[in-house]
Image: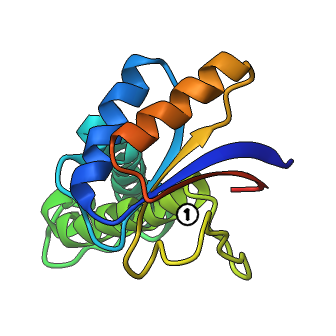
Amino acid sequence: MRRRFLVATFLDEGGLAKAILPARKERLRIHDVYAPYPVHALDSLMGIGKTRLPLVTLVAGACGLVFALAFQFYGAVLDWPLNVGGKPDNSTLAFIPIAFELTVLFGALATVAAFFLRARLYPGKREVLPTRGVTEHLFAVVLRRPETPVLLRRAREIMENAGAASVEELEAEL
């Protein structure tokens, strides 16, 4: 689905930071921000909340732990009980290393899978950049294009007052 955007490019991160707060105050929808290197506190400027990936890791790790303990208990107690040196069949201390390993494995794999799904990263996907140079030397703020001419004019004004090198409209699938 093609959408319409307003793309403002900046030569430095100072202008980028100056453009984001007024745009948020005017309730303009920021689609994304592009920078050639990590900009500290950019996510807090944009109002992005904390990620829920740790919750995915916790749930998947707990599932891995339960699976490991249940499978080992089934194998050692129910399916093939062996009397080794008079130890009990359910020797939980012997189950700890495998339970730990499967907890870490399930948690890690689920986190990677959730990240790829959430970021819509899949094999063969082509990158779509809003303008040339954003991965090299330019900073860009991509706004959803406001529907009314008054808001569109105000959005352009905010970006130009913040020091945008260029402000242009774009129709694409970003």
Is any atom of residue 112 visible in this view?
yes
Q: Can you say which quadrant of the picture contains the C terminus?
A: bottom right
Residue drawn 54% across the image and 36% down it:
156
Q: Dot 1: within a 10 Å radius of its alpha carbon, few (fewer than 14), some, or many (20 or more) residues?
A: few
**Residue 53: percent from left, percent from top:** 38, 47
Figure check: 137 above or below 96: below
> Can you identify the residue that label 1 sits on?
116
Residue drawn 55% across the image and 63% down it:
116
Q: Quadrant of residue 105?
A: bottom left
- Is 68 placed left or right of 171 in the picture? left
In the image, 103 versus 107, the foreground residue is 107
Is any atom of residue 48 visible in this view?
no
Q: Quadrant of residue 87?
A: bottom left
Asked which secondary structure carries label 1, the reply is helix
In the image, 105 versus 121, the foreground residue is 121
**Residue 83: percent from left, percent from top:** 26, 73
Q: Amino acid at mark 1?
A: Phe
Residue drawn 37% across the image and 78% down it:
137
**Residue 36: percent from left, percent from top:** 35, 73
Figure check: 111 above or below 160: below
- Is 144 placed left or right of 21 in the picture? right
Q: Quadrant of residue 95?
A: bottom left
**Residue 78: percent from left, percent from top:** 46, 58
In the image, 104 versus 21, the foreground residue is 21
Figure check: 145 above or below 110: above
Marker count (numbered):
1
